[in-house]
């Protein structure tokens, strides 16, 4: 099961690369690895904390106030993350404060909570939140690294324009690899089918 | 009664989360305050260095510095930017503008880039005020700073004039 969840949340259903959720902070903050890491950690903190709490409370949450409850929990964890970062990582905070605050509206987090944490038991919800966070972090930090590394040769990479272009190329690369892997997997299984 | 249950649950959770937030704020506040003060102090330090460099450049003596026309001063002004108040420190030598730094602001990251030292903000004191244009794409922010500095300079000129007149 772990393997399946890992494959789903890191690759085949990656929130950022496949579901394309949470792209606003992703594009805005990925101009350096440091900023990207800061947002990745903050998002992970919020997602894991909220998912764990919602999963524990899921039996007590009345259906009609489901969404307000989720937003309340997510907003609390986000504000806690912002306060901690402002206290202990002030320079980073100055760079990404605004995008930390809008984690509240990140549909990646609300999506995972609505789909998984509010329905599954604690361990399942926690595992999903952790793997989703890792999947998001990989895309965010990887994207940050690409932008930071290409910036000396291509200053455009640090602009919003460059962000869209590079992200588009990365997505294309992802699709290419994904299809290749799928094709190889298919050709591996086909001869066996013939033999039967 | 039954319809009240969701409301009560929501209120209870809100109260618990609220206290969690209050606790976090209570413990992080002193550190946050310290960080903000340090950041402010760094900007002011920068401005003092600019002022000192200018004094050295002009070879001003102690007694000259005590005259109104050459008095070194750092004045604070507040201007309304896009995201809230912008706290500005303006350095004067007499009525001459020497440098400007933004001490604190709540502008959107990226759009506040011109306010960083070494950026647009450094052109104050280096070029005449009426030659300094606002930066397109950060128009509201930079205009707020420029206008506040202009106003403060006008006031400074008036003050220095009346001061020189008295002495």
Image (spheres, coloured by chain):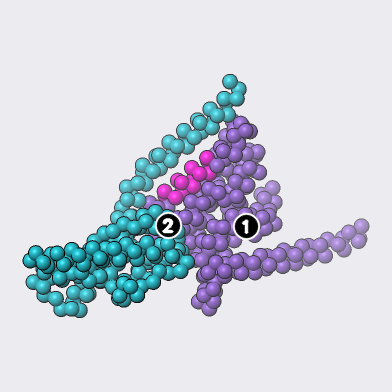
Chain colours: A purple, B cyan
What residue is shown with label 2? B82
Residue B92 position within the rendered picture, expressed as x and y whole percent measured from the top left: 22, 68
Q: Secondary structure at mark 1?
A: loop
Q: CA distance from mark 2 to mark 1?
A: 31 Å
Q: Main secondary structure of the magenta part?
A: helix
Q: Secondary structure at mark 2?
A: loop
Residue under the point 53% across and 27% down: B8
Between A18 and B126, the one nearer to me in the picture: B126
Residue under the point 68% across and 67% down: A172
Residue A57 position within the rendered picture, expressed as x and y whole percent measured from the top left: 57, 34
User: Is B100 positioned to the left or the right of B135 in the image?
Assistant: left
Label placed on residue B17: none
User: Is B18 positioned to the left or the right of A63 in the image?
Assistant: left
Between A11 and B77, the one nearer to me in the picture: B77
Q: Chain of mark 2?
A: B
Q: Chain of mark 1?
A: A
Quarter that holds the C terminus of chain A: bottom right
What residue is shown with label 1? A16
Q: Which residues are magenta?
A: A72-84
Between B80 and A170, the one nearer to me in the picture: B80
Question: Is A82 in the magenta?
Answer: yes
- Residue density around tag 2, few if under 14, some if 14–19, many if 20 or more, within 10 Å: some
């Amino acid at each position: 099961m772990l393997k399946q969840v890992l494959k789903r949340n890191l690759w085949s259903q990656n929130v950022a690369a496949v579901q394309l959720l949470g792209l606003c902070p992703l594009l805005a903050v990925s101009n350096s690895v440091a900023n990207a890491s800061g947002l990745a950690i903050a998002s992970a903190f919020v997602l894991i904390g909220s998912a764990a709490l919602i999963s524990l409370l899921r039996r007590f949450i009345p259906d009609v106030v489901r969404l307000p409850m989720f937003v309340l929990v997510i907003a609390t964890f986000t504000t806690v993350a912002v306060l901690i970062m402002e206290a202990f990582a002030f320079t980073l905070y100055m760079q990404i404060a605004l995008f930390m605050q809008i984690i509240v509206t990140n549909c990646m987090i609300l999506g995972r909570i609505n789909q998984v944490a509010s329905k599954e038991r604690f361990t399942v919800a926690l595992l999903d939140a952790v793997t989703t966070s890792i999947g998001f972090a990989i895309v965010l930090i990887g994207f940050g690294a690409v932008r930071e590394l290409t910036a000396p040769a291509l200053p455009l990479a640090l602009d919003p324009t460059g962000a869209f272009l590079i992200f588009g190329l990365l997505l294309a690369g992802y699709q290419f690899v994904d299809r290749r892997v799928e094709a190889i997997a298919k050709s591996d299984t086909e001869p066996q089918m013939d033999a039967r | 009664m039954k319809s009240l249950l969701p409301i009560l649950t929501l209120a209870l959770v809100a109260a618990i989360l609220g206290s969690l937030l209050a606790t976090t704020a209570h413990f992080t506040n002193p550190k946050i305050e310290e960080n903000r003060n340090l950041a402010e102090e760094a900007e002011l330090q920068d401005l003092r260095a600019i002022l000192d460099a200018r004094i050295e450049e002009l070879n001003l003596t102690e007694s000259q510095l005590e005259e109104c026309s050459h008095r070194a001063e750092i004045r604070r002004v507040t201007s309304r930017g896009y995201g809230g108040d912008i706290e500005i420190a303006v350095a004067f030598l007499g009525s001459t503008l020497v440098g400007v730094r933004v001490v604190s602001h709540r502008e959107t990251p990226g759009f506040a880039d011109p306010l960083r030292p070494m950026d647009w903000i450094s052109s104050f004191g280096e070029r005449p005020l009426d030659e300094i244009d606002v930066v397109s794409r950060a128009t509201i922010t930079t205009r707020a700073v420029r206008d506040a500095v202009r106003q403060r300079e006008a006031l400074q000129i008036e003050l220095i004039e009346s001061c020189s007149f008295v002495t």
